[in-house]
Amino acid sequence: MDDQLVYDSFFEGSYIDTIQDNKMIVVANSKLAVSILSTKYKDLIDEVVRQATESNFEIQFVDKEFTKKPVEIKPVKQPFFADSVINPQYTFKNFVVGPSNREAYQAALMISQNPGKLFNPLLIYGGSGLGKTHLLHAIGNALKEKYPAMRVLYIHAQEFLNEYVKYVQGQNEGTNLVDWFKDSVDVLLVDDVQFLAGRVRTEETFFSIYNNFHSAEKQVVLTSDKNPTDLNGLEERLRSRFVSGLPLNIKPIEKETCESILRLKIEANGLDVNDFDPEVIAYFAGTFGKNVRILEGALDRLLFYTVNIHKTKHVDLPTAMDSVSSLAEAQDAKTQLSEDKIISAVADYYSLAPYQLTGKIRTSQIAMARHIAMYLIRTLLDVPFTKIGQTFGGKDHATVMNGVQKVENSIKTDKELAKAVNELQVRLKA
Ligand code: ADP
Ligand code: MG
């Protein structure tokens, strides 16, 4: 890429937003520009600023969204879900609609215009990376815009479990959880309700909370990675409530929609779609399109590659294919497959945070994911059991060995598990 192009793509349009003490905040014109200015050109910019100002500013690059976000005024600390936030990046505007997700999108949009009155609960279910969480936050953002006073709460079902545990341990100074929901929340958005399955007391409490919302005509929106009718271990009455409103499926995204998503993300990075050969878009949609999260990851690689490694403005198919393979190789050589990488891949696969895998919580779902991570570390990296035990919070040799053994045995009979392990092995070797 020549200097002029670098300038036009990443420097042009950036400006100093604020200076406070020794901190300088610079707004750049895209996320990609932020990442490039703050890595590749950081030293250069630091030096130029130092010369011009004769002082050492600590420069932080941010994108435009950053300054649009209102200054966060932390509400009085609430006894529950104090850290819950609705992500302003996920909106209806940047959600690409196609046949696979149209129904879910329309229902979500309607609810955000008229909460509590149409279908309650709205349940969106479908596979990983198909936009369920995105839609949930989009509802939250649209509600906040239309009804600023409305108290909208987004929670992940896993957070609900954690909060419930703290609650029964009496860590919330006597506030009743069910009453708190009733008095403090107007619209409830719960992500990944499959995590509630198999937790009888938590389900009971959730059931009471849900009933209060329903009878007060307060909107509840739920997502699940499966149709609740296929959710093993979910209490019958909860299952029937979940599907009593409007259950809608997001299907795997068709190729054309994937291509539109790619074009949107390219433009969102401040680049021109016309610089990409149509075959590039088609190749990416075809290869990575089963899961939009993975598609985004691949696109990030491509953009990074064409800016930093194979400096080119026009992206053709060989370059694009090269970007995905050679980056994988480069990554292999540099970081190789590590325990951390395996743990994050498994965590990602099960929508968990890595610390949950290495931590102590023992729900059956987390325990299974943890065993799978141990199994992969053992089989792919040949790490001694004792060492694996240290990584997982000081477990002993026997515990790790049992976990690994369990996965080894179950793979032979449990198709679902075998598929998960296989998929993870493929991802880790990609
Ligand atoms: P899920 O919750 O179904 O696993 P997410 O909502 O987390 O999936 O989506 C994964 C990523 O893909 C997010 O970054 C999201 O913004 C993006 N994404 C998914 N579907 C779409 C879409 N139709 N249009 C734009 N972005 C999408
Ligand atoms: Mg999700």
Image (cartoon, grey):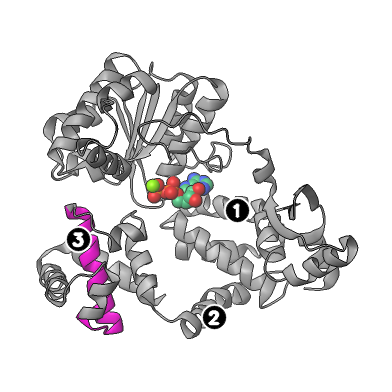
Q: Say the numbered circle drawn on residue 368.
A: 3
- Residue occupied by mark 2: 326
Frontmost of labels 2 and 3 is 3
- Provide residue 144's location: percent of width, then percent of height: 53, 26
Rounded to the nearest angstrom, the CA distance separating label 1 from label 3 is: 35 Å
On screen, residue 347 versus residue 410, left or right, reads right
Circle 2: element type: helix
Residue 410 in the image: state x and y as whole percent.
Answer: 12, 67
Q: Which residue is mark 1?
A: 265
In this orientation, does residue 278 appear?
yes
Label 2 and label 1: CA atoms lie apart by 22 Å
Disc 2 marks which amino acid?
Ser
Neighbor class of circle 1 (other Cα within 10 Å; few <14, some 14-19, many 20+) is some
On the rendered structure, is 42 left or right of 329? right
The response on whether ligand 1 sits within 8 Å of label 1 is yes
Q: Where are the magenta residues, as a range? A: 364-385
Disc 2 crowd rating (10 Å Cα; few below 14, some 14-19, many 20+) is some
Q: Residue at x 51, y 53 (%)?
A: 258
Rendered image quadrant of residue 282 = bottom right
